[in-house]
Image: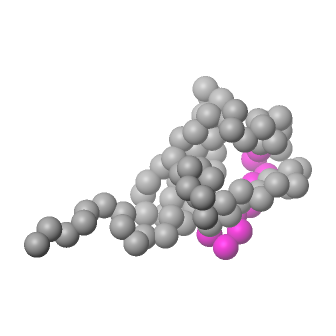
Amino acid sequence: MTHLQGYIGIQPTIKKIGFTPQGKMSVELLDGRKIVTPLTPFPSIEKLSAQQRKAWQIIDGVMFSFVDCDEVYHVSQLLGKNE
């Protein structure tokens, strides 16, 4: 019997948010994964200044926001999932 491998059943939990010099957002997860995404799908983050992007907050381990942004993002939005 073959068992599924990978991150099956593991809830992605946000550890840290950063931004690359190439203008992408980098989200580190507690399990060691790193998601790097362009900012174009997130226009409200894209328009924040570099200083404003440093003022992020993690909510319940699976959501994040920025002090100067009214939006709250879920880790599933980074993964392209509809949850």
**Rendered position, 10 above or below 33:** below
The answer to if 59 sits in the magenta stretch is: yes
**Residue 27 appearing in the image:** no
Q: Residue at x 56, y 50 (%)?
A: 80
Q: Residue at x 62, y 69 (%)?
A: 61
Q: Quadrant of the N terminus?
A: bottom left
- Residue positioned most to the top: 22
**Rendered position, 62 above or below 51:** below
Q: How is the image coloured?
A: one colour
Q: Quadrant of the C terminus?
A: bottom right
Quick one: 23 or 54, which is closer to the camera? 23
The answer to which quarter of the image holds residue 6 is bottom left
Q: Position of residue 30 (x, y in %)?
A: 49, 64
Q: Position of residue 20 (x, y in %)?
A: 60, 34
Q: Residue at x 60, y 58 (%)?
A: 82
**Residue 62 appearing in the image:** yes
In this rendering, would 44 be left or right of 33? right
Quick one: 71 or 83, which is closer to the camera? 83
Magenta-highlighted residues: 53-61
Q: Position of residue 76 (x, y in %)?
A: 59, 58
**Rendered position, 37 above or below 7:** above
The answer to which quarter of the image holds residue 71 is bottom right
In this rendering, would 79 be left or right of 25? left
In this rendering, would 25 be left or right of 11? right
Q: Position of residue 5 (x, y in %)?
A: 25, 63
